[in-house]
Image: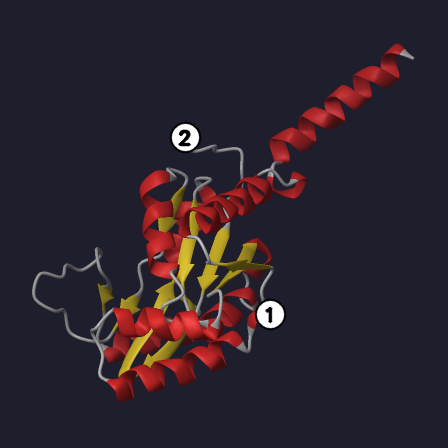
Amino acid sequence: MIDPCRRGLLVILSSPSGAGKSTLSRRLLSEDGEISFSISATTRPPRPGEEDGREYYFKDRAEFERMVVAGEMLEHAEVFGNLYGSPLGPVRDAMSAGRDVLFDVDWQGGQQIRNSEMGREAISIFILPPSIEELEHRLRKRAQDAPDVIARRMGEARREMSHWAEYDYILINDDLDTCYDQLRSVLVAERLRRDRRPDIAQQARLMSGQIKERT
């Protein structure tokens, strides 16, 4: 149930490929009614079956660049010739309604969000694999990529993990259920913070004043 008295959170979730971030995100979104996924905008053309506003907000380059210049993107980057970014408008709407917004981004995207005008509302969580060996094993187990692609992904993983110290929380995905429970615990605790509950602060002030009146 959405609590309209609570300010929403920006939840930044990052990890190297193969650490389980996507699995954790899907489970969280399916089981937690207070959080929504931040749908990215992109300049790449839609693939068969994709719909605007569901998988992505599809923009031409001129419109995307206009949004960046106008400050309408929380974060953005160019990947393989296409632009990707997180539109600010839907995020503001969700947060004003007391809904949290989940960002599945790399360390660069997370850094841009934390440095944005809404950075004070953000918490950042980094998912680590139990070991480099286990990460490589998971990537090979997928049987989806050629050896050279796996080697490139491992190099990218090492670069991504070098930024772990920039995050508020570090979770090790040794056991998926345990890691998910820890992720949920982080969200519950952050949602209960005093500065995110102006209604509770007001109630505390009122009760404190009533006590003074009786003494």
* Residue placed most toward the observer, 33 or 5: 33
Looking at the image, can residue 172 be seen? yes
* Relative image position of residue 60 (x, y in whole percent): 21, 75
Q: Is residue 41 above or below residue 191?
A: below
| Relative horizontal placement of residue 118, taking residue 73 as reference (left or right) | right
Residue lying at the far bottom of the rendered structure: 148
Residue 38 on image: x %, y %: 36, 56
Which image quarter holds the C terminus? top right
**Of marks 2 and 1, the one in the foreground:** 1
Residue 88 appears in the rendering: no
Picture residue at 48% right of the left edge, 33% below the top? 4
C-alpha separation, residue under disc 2 versus residue under disc 1:
31 Å
Give the amino acid at mark 2.
Met
At numbered mark 1, what does the secondary structure look like: helix, strand or loop?
A: helix
Residues under numbered marks 2 and 1 in contact, where contact means CB atoms less than 8 Å apart: no
Q: What x and y, as percent, mark residue 156?
A: 41, 82
Label annotation for residue 1? 2
Residue linked to disc 1: 166
Task: Describe residue 141's horizontal placement relative to residue 71 as left or right.
Answer: left
Q: Amino acid at mark 1?
A: Glu
Left or right: where does residue 118 sit relative to residue 33?
right
Residue sitting at x 37%, y 71%: 17
Category of crowding for the residue at label 1, using alpha-carbon neighbours closer than 10 angstroms: few (below 14), some (14–19), many (at least 20): some
In this view, 168 is above or below 133: above
Q: Is residue 122 above or below residue 17?
A: above
Quadrant of the rendering where the N terminus is positioned = top left
Tell me which residue sits at (40%, 46%) in the image.
Answer: 94
* Label 2: how many Cα within 10 Å (few below 14, some 14–19, many 20+): few
Of residues 117 and 114, the one drawn nearer to the viewer in this rendering: 114
Secondary structure of residue under mark 2: loop
